[in-house]
């Protein structure tokens, strides 16, 4: 897996041009760096190299040296001769070395691709009209680019199983499989759940699960993403919508503190699927299956869709005013959330400061899988710490808050997302206080709250999270929220403004960042536009010493971090 | 600025002044046409002959075996310039229709908004299954906007059955049943 090379730069000759590339990088990546596409199927930057599809054939040559003396062999002009290989080589398994010559678009290379394409297509069904991969299919694209455009095959095509159920989420169409083995290697190398393999030989080769096994692990849908053709399909997305109608929006997975980078695919306000987006510092090119379903709860009926004050539907402005009124009375406690964005937490902290409220938070933990699902099931715990909303790791329940309610020290609660009845507060205790509830779903708290401020899902608003590696990552709104709702950042900012002198207009996210950028600490000098699409690593500072719950996973190694910290500076 | 040039008008001759030759030519045309066979049609009682390849209302067709040809690939929806087509793709229920199960896909709903359609024929041209045709229906009217949206049933009713040269899916089924033997 040396495809990405080292940092040492060397010079190679790519189609007659001298170019600089990192040493040890393979020819496909090196050519890509300089704008040349070498078509490939089986090679995947994050998997081992199999070299079985032969689509990436190129010509390679090395400067010639005399075998006996090791002296360079020169031609009449005194230039070192190039010893071109007699046959093409595969680009995926050819690592560049100094002085190497590559031809990626010579006649013989074109002929090789044409031949490979013809062989791949002889038994391929003409399925594109009913194939979900159409529009994002490598075979379709490369056949158009490098194929011959008509078929010389007059024999009967092979018939293979069409609708094999491999697991709860993956359906296989064997006829379309080009036997690239990406899915097999993924299962072995990344998911560590070796269930896929080929049976039979030659053109009869068929992908199946081992007897008695199924492709059921929480990463199974990644095989659908990496399958270059329409063989592996998502049972959920199958036949739902053509990919060319779908709008892509960059998002962040909220399942755990890993913060996998994702792409949300939507059409006309409806989300159809979520796929991983490559980020080598966070999730490579993978994500969990469970993270892809997170948009579904937001389509349910128990979503809060109206701002209410004492049970009456109101406009956001009036609801914000009512909330500010309650907060002004004092004796406030805030229950924050690690599901809120950095910006929302910042405004919440400002509200807490203005009202002198104490802030508590609860942890949400689950079992980690050591890959891309961490133990901390909230996307932005580190954001809350960096914001100063909380200064220590949250606990499992709110017994302290319950005592404060009993003693009368707390008379007003501002609750974000949490269902307090699950966290150690009784309904009787909730009855003793005034409650402002901010959340997406109806629960026991929203039912008794004086002011209910519905919130939007991560797909409906923009914002940023800080992940397990203290990486600040932003996401954009993919679809509009329920009619009449504005992002909770706006509502919170209105409440905050009403508590002070400011005007009560909902600010934009960039305006909020102007304020965050003025704070001291890691956010100083940052602005919304300055957060790069691939995220920004923040200095953890003293927070790194906290005893975070995450154990080792794909991109986090607490032991190594600790060792690095222990080293004298 | 362009200069204006005044052209002298030719004075009328005596014959022109009487207008009689002009009236005579006009009457000749009138009487000539009175005696010819009329070319206007008494629409709607009389209907014109629609030539082949006429681009009328787009319709969905079935093959001679009565099989729904559209597989809801949504290419026509994509290509339609005024976005008149709206398809809800669906999966064929293998249990309910075993002899069609191998096609896998069919439209759950298919709508063409005839208030939007510009009769360009792109949908017919792009269809990989030869399922959508602009046929000879040319007059379409309704009392409401909803009525002008042709639903799937209406589209098949208008389309009827057209001959098929390929029977692609029947061949596929045959290959599946006999085809290359399992080894
Ligand atoms: S895998 Fe690609 S080429 Fe094959 S039927 Fe599907 S879209 Fe067409
Ligand atoms: S199913 Fe897809 S990924 Fe797996 S071997 Fe076949 S073509 Fe490759
Ligand atoms: S004829 Fe043209 S405008 Fe009408 S439905 Fe077809 S593609 Fe659309
Ligand atoms: S009518 Fe043709 S182009 Fe349109 S969805 Fe059906 S098969 Fe595709
Ligand atoms: S990509 Fe090189 S052989 Fe498949």
Image: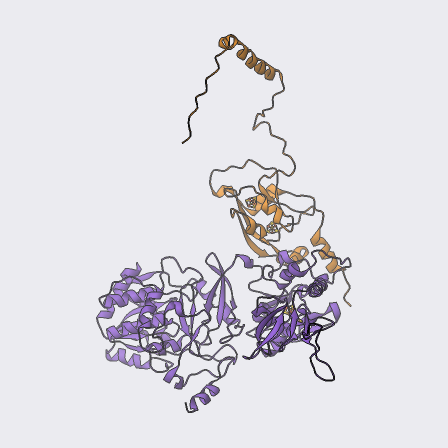
Chain colours: A purple, B orange
Percent x, y of residue A314 = 30, 59
Percent x, y of residue B51 = 64, 35
Above or below residue A488? Residue B131 is above
- Dividing the picture into quarters, in which one does residue B3 lie? top left
Position of the C terminus of chain A, as image quadrant, is bottom left
Position of the N terminus of chain A, as image quadrant, is bottom right
The number of numbered discs placed on residues in the rendered structure image is 0
The residue that appears at 58% across and 52% down in the rendered structure is: B75
Percent x, y of residue A444 = 36, 70
* Residue sitting nearer the eye, A112 or A423: A112
Percent x, y of residue A463 = 39, 68
Pick out the residue farthest to the front.
A77
Asked whether residue B43 is in view, the answer is yes
Along the horizontal axis of the image, is A184 left or right of A472? right
* Residue sitting nearer the eye, B44 or A115: A115
The residue that appears at 57% across and 40% down in the rendered structure is: B57
- Dividing the picture into quarters, in which one does residue B91 lie? bottom right
Along the horizontal axis of the image, is A534 left or right of A232? left
| Rendering quadrant holding ligand 2 | bottom right
């Amino acid at each position: 897996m040396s495809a990405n090379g080292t940092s040492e730069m060397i010079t190679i000759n790519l189609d007659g041009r001298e170019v600089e590339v990192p040493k040890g990088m393979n020819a496909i990546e090196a050519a890509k760096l300089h704008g040349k596409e070498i078509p490939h199927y089986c090679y995947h930057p994050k998997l081992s190299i199999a070299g079985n599809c032969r689509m990436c054939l190129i010509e390679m040559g090395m400067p010639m040296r005399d075998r006996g003396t090791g002296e360079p062999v020169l031609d009449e002009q005194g230039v070192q001769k190039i010893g071109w290989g007699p046959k093409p080589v595969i680009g995926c398994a050819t690592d560049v070395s100094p002085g190497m010559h590559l031809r990626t678009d010579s006649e013989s290379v074109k002929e090789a691709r044409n031949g490979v394409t013809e062989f791949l297509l002889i038994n391929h069904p003409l399925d594109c009209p009913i194939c979900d991969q159409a529009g994002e299919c490598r075979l379709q694209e490369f056949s158009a680019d490098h194929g011959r455009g008509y078929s010389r095959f007059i024999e009967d095509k092979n018939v293979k199983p069409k609708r094999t159920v491999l697991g709860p989420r993956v359906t296989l169409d064997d006829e379309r499989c080009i036997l690239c083995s990406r899915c097999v290697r993924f299962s072995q190398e990344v998911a560590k759940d070796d269930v896929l393999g080929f049976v039979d030989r030659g053109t009869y080769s068929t992908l199946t699960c081992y007897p008695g096994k199924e492709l059921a692990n929480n990463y199974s849908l990644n095989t659908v993403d990496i399958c270059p053709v329409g063989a592996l399909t998502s049972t959920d997305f199958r036949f739902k919508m053509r990919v060319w109608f779908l709008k892509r929006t960059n998002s962040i997975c909220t399942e755990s503190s890993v913060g996998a980078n994702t792409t949300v695919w939507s059409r006309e306000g409806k989300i159809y699927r979520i796929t991983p987006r490559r980020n080598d510092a966070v999730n490579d090119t993978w994500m969990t299956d469970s993270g892809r379903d997170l948009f579904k709860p937001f389509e349910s009926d128990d979503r809060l869709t109206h701002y209410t004050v004492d049970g009456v539907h109101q406009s956001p402005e009036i609801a914000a005013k009512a909330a500010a009124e309650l907060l002004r009375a004092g004796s406030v406690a805030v229950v924050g959330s690690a599901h809120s964005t950095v910006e929302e937490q910042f405004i919440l902290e400002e509200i807490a400061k203005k009202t002198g409220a104490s802030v508590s938070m609860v942890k949400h933990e689950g079992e980690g899988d050591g890959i891309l699902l961490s133990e901390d099931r909230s996307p932005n715990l580190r954001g809350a710490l960096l914001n100063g909303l909380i200064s220590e790791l949250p606990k499992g329940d709110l017994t302290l808050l319950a005592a404060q309610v009993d003693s009368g020290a707390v008379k007003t609660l501002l609750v974000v997302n949490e269902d307090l009845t699950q966290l150690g507060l009784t309904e009787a205790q909730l009855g003793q206080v005034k409650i402002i509830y901010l959340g997406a779903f109806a629960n026991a708290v929203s039912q008794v709250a004086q002011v209910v401020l519905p919130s939007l899902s991560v797909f409906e608003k923009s914002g940023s999270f800080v992940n397990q590696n203290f990486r600040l990552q932003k996401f954009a709104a993919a679809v509009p929220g329920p009619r009449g709702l504005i992002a909770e950042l706006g509502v919170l900012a209105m409440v905050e403004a009403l508590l002070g002198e400011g005007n009560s207009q909902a600010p934009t996210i960039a305006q909020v960042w102007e304020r965050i950028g003025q704070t001291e600490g890691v956010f100083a000098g940052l602005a919304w536009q300055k957060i790069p699409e691939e995220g920004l690593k923040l200095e953890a500072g003293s927070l790194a010493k906290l005893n975070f719950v995450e154990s080792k996973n794909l991109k986090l190694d607490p032991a190594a971090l600790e060792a690095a910290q222990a080293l004298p500076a | 600025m362009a200069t204006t040039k005044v052209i002298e008008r030719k004075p009328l001759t005596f014959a022109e002044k009487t207008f009689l030759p002009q009236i005579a030519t006009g009457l000749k045309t009138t009487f000539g046409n009175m005696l010819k066979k009329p070319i206007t049609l008494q629409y709607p009682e009389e209907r014109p002959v629609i030539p082949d390849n006429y681009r009328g209302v787009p319709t969905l067709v079935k093959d001679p075996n009565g099989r729904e040809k559209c597989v809801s690939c949504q290419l026509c929806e994509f290509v339609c310039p005024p976005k008149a087509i709206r398809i809800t793709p669906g999966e064929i229920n293998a249990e309910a229709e075993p002899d069609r199960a191998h096609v896998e896909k069919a439209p759950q709903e298919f709508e063409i908004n005839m208030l939007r359609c510009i009769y360009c024929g792109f949908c017919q041209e792009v269809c990989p299954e030869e399922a959508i045709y602009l046929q000879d229906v040319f007059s379409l009217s309704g009392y409401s906007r909803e009525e002008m949206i042709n639903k799937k049933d209406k589209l098949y009713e208008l389309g009827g059955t057209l001959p098929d040269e390929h029977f692609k899916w029947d061949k596929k089924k045959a290959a599946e049943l006999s085809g290359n033997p399992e080894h």
